Image (cartoon, helix red, strand yellow):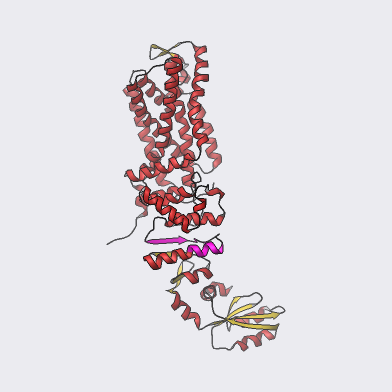
Amino acid sequence: MDNTINISKYRTSKMLDFRKLLVVVYLEFRAVSGRKGDFIAKLTNPMVYLLFFAVGIKSLIGKEVTYNGLNVQYLDYVVPGLICIFMTNFLSHSLFRAIIDKQWGLLGLKLLNGVSPLTYILGMSIYPFVVFTLQSTIIILLSFIMFLVKYSIKTILIAYVLSYIAILFWTSLGIVLAMIVKNYHQRDLLISIIILPITFTAPIFYSLDNVPLYVNIISKINPLTYFVELIRSILLRKPNMLILSIALIITCFLVNIAIYAIRKTEMKSQSF
Amino acid sequence: MYTKLIDFDWYLDVYDNVLMGSLLAGNKLSKARKDTSFILEKFGLYSKKDVGVETLSGGQQQRVQVARAIVHDPKIMILDEPIVGMDLTSSIEVLSFLREKAHSEGKTVIISSHQLSLLENYCDSIIFLSKRNMITYSNMNDFKKKYGKFNKYYIEYEGKISEEVLRKIKSKCKIVRNIKPLQIIMIDEFPITTILNILNDDVKITQTKIDDLSLEDVYLFINKEAYNG
C-alpha cells in the first residue's frame, strides 16, 4: 500500500468539505467573539448612517429621485444603498484575517489538514454574511419604524440570499489582496486606496440617472455598483437579470482568482 | 507536524488556538474540547486557557504550540525544536509526556533538537545529521555503549596553550572544548599522561578529572567539522 502523502494535493483540491467548512466558520466566529466592541460598532454604524447621513441628504435632495426612469421616495431608494455600503467593510475584515493566516503559517496548517482553498474562502465569508444580515435588518427595521419605509418580507428575504453573492465577492477580494501584500504598510495603503473610491463611485446616495457622464462611466467599472443595483432592484421590486448575471460572473471570477492566489502563495510563516 | 516558529491566530485565546489543532484534524467539537482541556492540563496551561496568546511568555507560547500539534493524538509526531525557549521544568514535563505517549500508546515521536543533554534522557533512538547527511542512526543504549569505551578528561591549567601544542594534542586525541578546563576525548591507546606531558611544555596543569561521554560530547566527537575547527 502506498502511504505517500502528496502535500500538493491539499493545495490544489477543488473539493468543498462541509466538515472543514464548519471548522473554518467556527474558528472565525471564535476569533471575533473576544472583540465585542468591534461587533457593537458594526451594528451601530448602520443606525448612524441612516439617521444622520441619509436623512440629512434627503433634506437636500428632496423626497423623490429618479430610478430607472421612475420616481421613487429617496429613503426607499437609499436604504438598499446603505445596506450595501457595509459590504466593503468585509473586504478589510477578510484581508486582516487572511493576512494573519498567511503571515503566521495558519493557512498552510489549514490546507495541510484538508481545508481546500474553496472551503477556506466560503468559510471566511460566513461571519461577514451573518453580520451583514444583522446590519441590514437593523437598517430595514429602523427605516420602517422611523420613516415608514416598507419592503415586502419576501423581497427582503430574496435580497438577503442574493447579498451572499456580494459578500463572497468582497471576502474573495480581501483574500486575494492578503495573498499579494508583503507588509502591513501595503495592506493599510490598499484599504485606504480601495474603500473610499469604491464607496463614493457607486450609486449609494445618488441615482446614476442624473450624474455626469464620467461618474456614470466610473461607476460601471465599480463592482459595488452591481451589488447595490442588485439589492435595490430586488427591494424595489424591479428585478434585473442582467445585473444579477453580472454580479454572479464577477463573483465567480474573483472566487477563482482567490483559489488561484491561495494555491500560489507561500505556505510558511512570513515576516511582515 | 510542528514548526518551532510562533504560529498563532492572535485573535484566538489559548484554548481556541489548541482546539484548532483538534478540529482541523477532523475531531468533533465535543471530543476536541475534551482533548484540549486534557492537554492544557497536562502542559500546565489550563489556568491560562482564556487569555490571549500574546500575554504568555515565550516558553508558554511554545507549550501552546506543542499542545496544538499533538492535541488530536496523532500516531506519528514530528516535532521541530519543541522545547526551545522553555524552562527546564516545562521541558521535562513535555518530554516526559511525549515519552509516556511513545511507550504506553505506541506512538512514534520524532524530535529535532539541539538540546542534546535533555534528549539523552528521553529518547530511545538517535539520528545525528550533519550537512544534510545522516552521520549515525542508532538505539540510544547501543549508541552510548559504542562510545562508552571512550573517556572524557577535564584538564585544569594555568597559562595559555600555544597553537603548536594544540596541534600536537589534536593529533593524539579529540578536543571537545578548547576553553578552561580543556576537555578532551582519548580515542587511541595513548595514556592520558602522553597528553599531559605535551601540555606541561606550555602550561602548568593543576587538576585532571575523568568523566563519561555525554550525548553532546559524542555529537562533537563524531561531527568532523567541529573537530577540524
Q: Is residue A180 magenta?
A: no
Q: Is residue B228 visible?
A: yes
Tell me the residue at 52%/63% (across/down): B91
Number of numbered discs on residues: 0
Q: Would you say residue B92 sits in the magenta stretch?
A: yes
Q: Is residue B96 left or right of residue B31?
A: right
B106 to A209, vertically: above or below: below
Asked whether B9 or B198 is in front, the reply is B9
Image location (x, y in percent) of residue A261: 42, 43
Q: Quadrant of the N terminus of chain A?
A: bottom left
Q: Against B103, is B162 above or below?
A: below
Q: Residue at x 51, y 46 (%)?
A: B10
Q: Nearer the viewer, residue A206 or B152?
A: B152
Q: Is residue B59 above or below residue A125?
A: below
Name which residue lies at 39% across and 39% down: A257
Name the quadrant containing residue B106: bottom left
- Which span of residues is magenta-colored? B71-94
Residue B112 lies, in percent from the top left, at: 47, 64
Left or right of B54, for residue A202:
left
Left or right, A157 with respect to B60, comes to left
Q: Is any part of residue A221 visible from this angle?
A: no
Q: Position of residue B209 (x, y in %)?
A: 62, 82
> Considering depth in this image, is B30 or B218 the residue closer to the camera?
B30
Vertical position of residue A149 compared to residue B200: above or below? above
User: What is the x, y in percent for residue B146?
Assistant: 46, 80
